[in-house]
Structure formats: C-alpha cells, structure tokens
Amino acid sequence: MNIIQNTLEFSDQFLWELVLWCCGRDNLDLDTRTITTIKFRNGHTRAYRGACWTTKNGGRFYIELGDSSRFPHTCTLHGVTTTTEDRIEGLVLVTAHELTHVKQHKMWWHARDTTPSGRNPRGLSQILEREGELRGGLVLELFKRNREALLTEWRRYGSNDPDWNIVQKKILTAAKDM
C-alpha cells in the first residue's frame, strides 16, 4: 500500500515533496517514518480541512481541499488568523497542521499513560490544536516567501518517473522497519 492516497489534481510525487518539505522545517522537524498513511481528496463544503489519528507507531491523516472558488480564505481558529490565497497555500497550511499532530503523538500517548482515567488531561486538545495552527501558519509563511522555487522543486518528478518508484519503495521499507 502507498503511503499517499490521492484524488487531487496534484501528483503523488508533488504531494510527497510537499510533505517532505513541511517535515523538514525547523518548527516541525518530523521524521517521515512516523507517517503511515496520508489521504488527499477533494472537498465540497469548506476551503480545507483535515484530521489526524495517531497510535504508538505513528500517525495517519487526511486532507480535504475545496474548489478554487473557496479561495482566498481567511480563518481564525484558537486565536490564530491565517489567510490562504489559493488551493496550494491551503494544502501547505493544513498539511503542516496535521503533521504537527503526528509530531505531538508521543505527547498524547504519554498523557494517556499518566492520567488515572487513561484520557487526555482537560484542555490538552485545545493546546495541541493551537500549536497546530501556529506551526501551520509559520510553515505557510515560509512557503509564501519561496513559493516559485518550491513549486519548481516539487514538480521535478514526472508521474511515471522511475526514480519516484525507487523513492516510494524506500519510504515503504523504512515505515515497515520502524
């Protein structure tokens, strides 16, 4: 099974390059081997949204993007206001937000193990969501500063590029070895 499941107009390779770039930002610094599945799909009701599920072995998440008519889009969540001008910026923002949750998974599991009820302490989810919004916004600002160069880099693989198949196999092997 591929890590990326995709119904968007962007290639799997483009999306993986975006994920790798987001993971490598200083404010995320996430090991991609902790990602088990990412689903990218078209949405119909919002500009974008996402959700993340984590286990002790890592995280999986989905990202849903609305059509172009929903952009530009300004959103305020947990006291953080972010503006995305188009679908690509929405994709960067929500990807970084959900990757933040994958990074946080150790904190969640530790919190579960240290509370008498086995549940997250009250208020933890709001703290984690705010952190996701802040980190997502920081990654989006970095993307906006380097947009054209990054888009060129992310499109370097063609859809049938044999090098991409090698990269994908290495990703899957690393994930299984965890």
Image: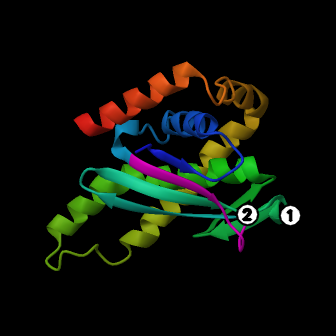
Three-letter amino acid code at the position of disc 2: Gly
98 relative position to 41: left or right: left
Quadrant where the C terminus is found in the figure:
top left
Q: Where residue 61 appears, x then y in whole percent?
A: 46, 57
- Seen at 66% across and 45% down, the residue is 140
Whether residue 146 is in magenta: the answer is no
Distance between the alpha carbons at the discs numbered 1 and 2: 8 Å
What residue occupies the far right of the structure in this picture? 69
Could you tell me residue 161's position as x and y percent? 60, 23
| Vertical side of 117 occupied by 15: above or below | above
Against 103, residue 176 (above or below) is above
From the viewer's side, name the closer residue of 31 and 26: 31
Q: Is residue 51 left or right of 31 when viewed as pictured?
A: right
Q: Which residue is mark 2?
A: 66
The residue closer to the viewer here, 133 or 152, is 152
Residue 44 magenta: yes
Seen at 32% across and 50% down, the residue is 58
Indicate the position of residue 24 as horizontal and vertical percent values: 50, 33
Could you say whether the residue bearing mark 1 is in a helix, strand or loop? helix
Q: Is residue 92 left or right of residue 52?
A: right
Looking at the rendered structure, the secondary structure element under dot 2 is loop
Q: How many marks?
A: 2
Q: What is the number of the mark on residue 69?
A: 1
Q: Are marks 1 and 2 in contact (CB under 8 Å)?
A: yes
Residue 152 percent coordinates (x, y)? 74, 26
Q: Considering only vertical position in the picture, is 86 above or below 46?
A: above
Amino acid on which disc 1 is placed = Ser
Magenta segment range? 36-46
Q: Residue at x 33, y 78 (%)?
A: 122
Q: Quadrant of the N terminus?
A: top left
Q: Residues within 10 Å of mark 2 (few under 14, many from 20)?
A: many
Q: Residue furthest top?
A: 163
